Image: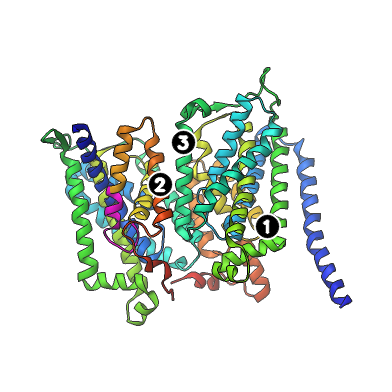
Amino acid sequence: MSTLSAVKTKRNWQRSFVPSVFGVIAVAIATAVESHLPGGELRAISTIFMFIALSQAWNIIGGFTGYASFGQVVFFGMGGYFTAVVMLKWQFTFWLALPLSGLFAAAFAVIIGVPLLRLKGHYFAIATLGMAEGMREVVINLPDLTGGGAGISVPIAGKFAKTEYLGDNGFYFLFLALAIFSIIIGTIVSRNKFGYGLRAIHQNEDAAAAVGINTVRSKVIAYAISAFMTGMVGAGYVFQQVTIFPERLFDVEITVLMIMMVVIGGSGTVVGPLLGALGLQFISEYLREHFTSMHTFILGGIIILAVILIPQGAVNYLREGRRTKNYSLLANIRRYRL
Amino acid sequence: MDTFLQVTSYGLLQGGLLALVAVGFSLVWGIMNIVNLCHGAFVILGAYIAWEMQSWIGVDPFLGMFVSAAVLFCLGYVIQRYLINLIVNGPVFITLLLTFGINMILIQGMNLLFTADFRSIQTSYGSNSFELGNIRIPLVRLLAFLLAIIITFLLVAFVKRTRTGISIMATGMDRGAARLMGIRARHVYALTFGISAALAGMAGTMIASIETFDPSKAGKFTLMAFVVAVLGGLGNMYGALVGGLLMGLVQAWAGQYLSGTWVNAIAFLVLIIVLIFKPNGLVGKAFYAARVEI
């Protein structure tokens, strides 16, 4: 008995120690290189951090719970607009607006989650997509509050600006912090009972309910956590961009990027979205620089190849390969083939 | 009252066009459980083919649409047979991502080939219209509307009366059993996708002769097809027609009686309400949710 618990403790210790060491090293490197990077690189890396946080957020509802939220950008936009409005109209500081935007997005997720999470599969995807498109129109049509289609600007200088603009370095650290925060939340969800409940819902919702998981509550909480993080990232993005427009803040492409990163990296894992965001954003930036006109073309080709060759995502592919000692891509294609 | 009738007739005509865009999308979704995100790109590609036909050799769009349909049928067949069939049993995200990747390539390809300029097909009768009481009805829109209805009925006749059509329906209901009866599911899937792409091409031709188009409009058509297919429901060939007409009416009324761009928000509001109270759509059938896949 004591040996067993000792082994278990050791395992648990290893499980949390090894990734944290990697994490600390990565953060140390990120902090150390920051002062040596030019502005353009800083912004590019901030974007990578932003997408790490976004893909981790999507992973909680899409990866663990298996609900394809195709309108995740609605929380990005709602959080962002919340920040812009409270900073402009009521002179909130950014540091107060940031967590409040997350809470605002989470509250919105609870309200729409209760009816929408009853839907499954494609129907959930389209309903959330419709919600995002609809909210964009609502924002456009409330010009008194949101500036409408003409956009809205966050005060960054003068007596109305409670928080100074952070600059490239500041946003680098802001998004780094958001990325770390999202990874920590992802790890906590992944390791505890709640996360296993979400995985059970993913595999078979009826069976999960039968073993005593309150599926409705779990799904809504997962949706709210995911919305909370997405909303905070949206707030950071708005402050970085200063002037924002509804088209950009509710752009369906942001959702698609999140999903691509999670699926290509490996959904339902914490490392997967991290690797997916790093890899895809890096490739995308590289292509944009070196093959400007063919950029989308090549990216589309890479997505098609990745989806066909490793449909379960890179991390899951490696894990299964290590377990079964079979890294054959051909066997992998056969899995989902008709 | 005249305004109301005018708006309603416009909504019905526009609804027919939406139905034409959505009918192929709904077919693919219902039979194969694939949400085809490159459907809008097919629509635009069809429009470009008809445009090229007209500007090169002066083919009328109502003839050119058959060329569009033929080209897109071949493209759709190949895409399904050699790409989508490889992952057709995967989870939802996988098929969505694959078709999104194809969509990116198609749109970028069209941007490179045809540039991003707005285009439209000009015909001698393009601006003709006639009066019905106090209501003005544009000729081309009416023809497009009639085409949508004819195509829907032809499609119903095809899947109910022909051997190929019945095999498509059988594969949609229970792929495993269909394969045991000797139906080549891979071929049937590719055929279904080809038909869907061909219908998208025809819809694109109609759109090109009614309004302007450019590659960036593809996303809008995919979204519209999605909304209309969900509204009408899957598993019923008339679903797209019902959904399209309803959507057209809602948009026309909202555009007339509400200010600004509330019209789009209303469209999605209707969609979400229908989804919550009638998850299978207005005329959809439930068995598509619970079928067996082998």
Select label 1 or label 3 by which is in front.
3
Q: CA distance from mark 1 to mark 2?
A: 33 Å
**Do the residues indicated by labels 3 and 2 lie within the same chain of the protein?**
no
Q: Residue at x 25, y 57 (%)?
A: B70
Ranked by sequence position, the earlier of labels 1 and 3 is 3
Q: Pinpoint residue B125: horizontal percent, then vertical percent.
A: 14, 37
Kind of residue sitting beneath label 2: Ile
Q: Residue at x 47, y 38 (%)?
A: A136
Residue holding disc 3: A138
Q: Dot 2: what SS?
A: helix
Q: Chain of mark 3?
A: A
Q: Dot 3: what SS?
A: helix
Kind of residue sitting beneath label 1: Val
Q: Which residues are magenta?
A: B233-245
Residue holding disc 2: B107
Residue holding disc 1: A270
Neighbor class of circle 1 (other Cα within 10 Å; few <14, some 14-19, many 20+) is many
Kind of residue sitting beneath label 3: Val
Q: Residue at x 56, y 60 (%)?
A: A66
Residue B8 location, quadrant: top left
Q: Is residue A242 above or below residue A99?
A: above
Q: Residue at x 72, y 61 (%)?
A: A191
Select label 1 or label 2 by which is in front.
1
Say if the magenta span includes residue A267. no
